[in-house]
Amino acid sequence: MAILPILETPDPRLRLISTPVEAFDDDLRTLIADMLETMYDAPGIGLAAIQIGVPKRVLVIDLQEPAEEGGEPVRNPRVFINPEIFDPSAGTTLYNEGCLSVPDQYADVERPTTVRARWQDEYGAPQEAELDGLLATCLQHEMDHLEGVLFIDHLSRLKREMVLKKLEKARRARAA
Ligand code: GNR
Ligand code: NI
């Protein structure tokens, strides 16, 4: 297992369209283990393979919600291979999103509240579920990465440029 560097915007690799997984082999399971370790280390609640430079349709998500109020977070890693979403709800939810590839910047993004999703697990077995809450939001954010889309692309041009300017300012402050 390895913690890998996370690509940050404007790295052009974040704009690639990821290709479907065909081989459910040990290399895939190593990639998943590395993605989970990198996500927990960041820390983040989701990661797409392209964020570590691998243009494959592989996502990991762990919302790490405490089992009880004030309790320790309990790990619940979820793996989505070749995911698809359909039947988005008409109702939408605003969530203040962030992205490990746009570090420390947050903005409200509106997305369907619930979606149905189909995907494969790490052994290739098909899965299907209706998702809601933060899991629905996060899966939609991660699926955007598979198409080379970042959450800032959902903002108005003015808001996107404000976020990118703040990111540059934070980077300059760190370098100084
Ligand atoms: O850690 C993350 N938090 C988050 C918060 C709201 C909506 C989406 C996310 S995903 C993000 C990690 C990441 O960049 N995944 O691609
Ligand atoms: Ni992201």
Image (cartoon, rainbow, N blue to C red):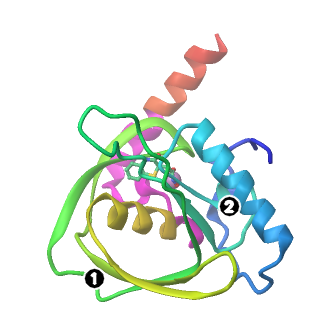
Q: Residue at x 35, y 53 (%)?
A: 157
Q: Residue at x 56, y 15 (%)?
A: 173
Q: Can residue 18 be seen here?
A: yes
Report the span colored magenta: 145-165
Q: Quadrant of residue 172?
A: top right
Is 112 displayed left or right of 162 in the figure? left
Secondary structure under tag 1 reads loop
Quarter of the picture holding the C terminus: top right
Is 108 displayed left or right of 24 in the figure? left
Q: Is residue 41 above or below residue 88?
A: above
Residue, disc 2: 50
150 within the magenta span: yes
Q: Quadrant of residue 22?
A: bottom right
Q: Residue at x 48, y 55 (%)?
A: 76
Q: Position of residue 56 (x, y in %)?
A: 71, 72
Q: Which of the two discs, 2 and 1, labels the residue nearer the N terminus?
A: 2
Q: Position of residue 147 (x, y in %)?
A: 56, 73
55 within the magenta span: no
Is 93 displayed left or right of 1 in the figure? left
Q: Main secondary structure of the magenta part?
A: helix
Q: Amino acid at mark 2?
A: Ile
